Image (cartoon, helix red, strand yellow):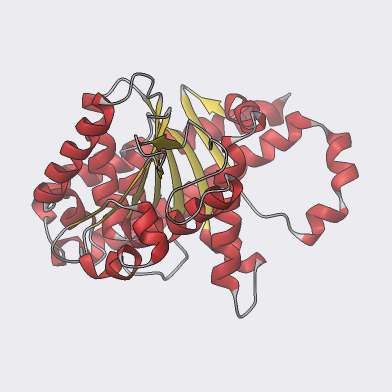
Amino acid sequence: MGELLTLQVGHCGCQLGLQFWNELRLANNLSLSGHSTSAPDSRLFTESLSSHYSPNSLFIDTCPDTLTKMQHSDLGRFLSPFLTGSSSTSNQFGVGYFDQQLLMDQLSFELRKRSEKCDKLKQFQIIQALGGGTGSGTGSKIVEMISENYQCDIKCCQVFPQSGFCLQSPNNCVLGVSKCLDCQMVWFDNQQLFSQYRSKNGMELVNGFITQSITQQLFTNKQQIQLETNNVNGQQIQLVQAKTNETNENDNQRKMRGEKEEVSQMQNKVRDLLQTQLDQFQIIKQLNVRKYSHAEETAEMYDEAFDKVQNVIQQYQDIHNIAESQ
């Protein structure tokens, strides 16, 4: 088995995973039956005794309806297994985090089975969106389980919600981020991406940009430089954004400014992205927390999440202040 195991979590995560693995399948000359004329990337695919290759991946969602069409498609058969719960989380972090024990037991079994066959597993990659209850809640639970049971790096590719996605999305996002701060995080801002790709097929373009970005990072070390320069107290955070026309027009100026200023701008964007979610989080917490499931269980989580994310924002602000004073 390869070095990397990818988990797609929630509706958005699974949709992205579908496109992500199809691109990798085509790049590695694999048929839908899993056969190839040449050996594919051993980090990503596992070979069976019958020279059949399968992706090192698991598709996970709490709602079975989401994965049914995927599972019974030609590509779905290539990508199996799919692990599902019994019902939707209704966009609530608490439901995704607390109510999925059966799903977590299935996942624990699958991970143990796969890890026993592997002598060089190095990293778990989790593709998730933070606006809904499964990507944020169940995704957080999965991160905790992996951290407790496996001595591997965890890389979380996370999609931040658009404004107005759902009432609870800022809560879900802040809670989800707070649970993953010890991981390597790659963030995609849906608000910025949809503003950039304004067209009838905007969703397709956004998904394409995200999956291509995740794929490219598998085959280049460039992002590691960005992560190291954007490392705040051990937290590795990379914000990936689509280039605007203005950015393209000023590429030469950007090069002249140098990498240091580019990193500073990215740090400010990370800070602002978190601050936007945290501001909405505070308002919605005060107005609505009592109306949602697991309000009592998540009460302490809310306070802890706020403090953790506020601390990250403050660290980035301190860096900005120091840079401004020099």
Q: Is residue 294 above or below residue 274?
A: below
Rendering coords of residue 229 (x, y %) = 62, 26
Residue 145 location, quadrant: top left
Q: Quadrant of the C terminus?
A: top right
Q: Is residue 20 above or below residue 125?
A: below
Q: Is residue 298 above or below residue 201?
A: above
Residue farthest along the front direction in this orientation: 50
Rendering coords of residue 144 (x, y %) = 24, 34
Q: Nearer the viewer, residue 188 or 44?
A: 44
Rendering coords of residue 287 (x, y %) = 24, 65
Rendering coords of residue 170 (x, y %) = 36, 58
Residue 263 location, quadrant: top right
Residue 105 location, quadrant: top left
Is residue 136 at least partly visible in the picture?
Answer: yes
Is residue 282 at least partly visible in the picture?
Answer: no
Residue occupying the point 61% across, 80% down: 200
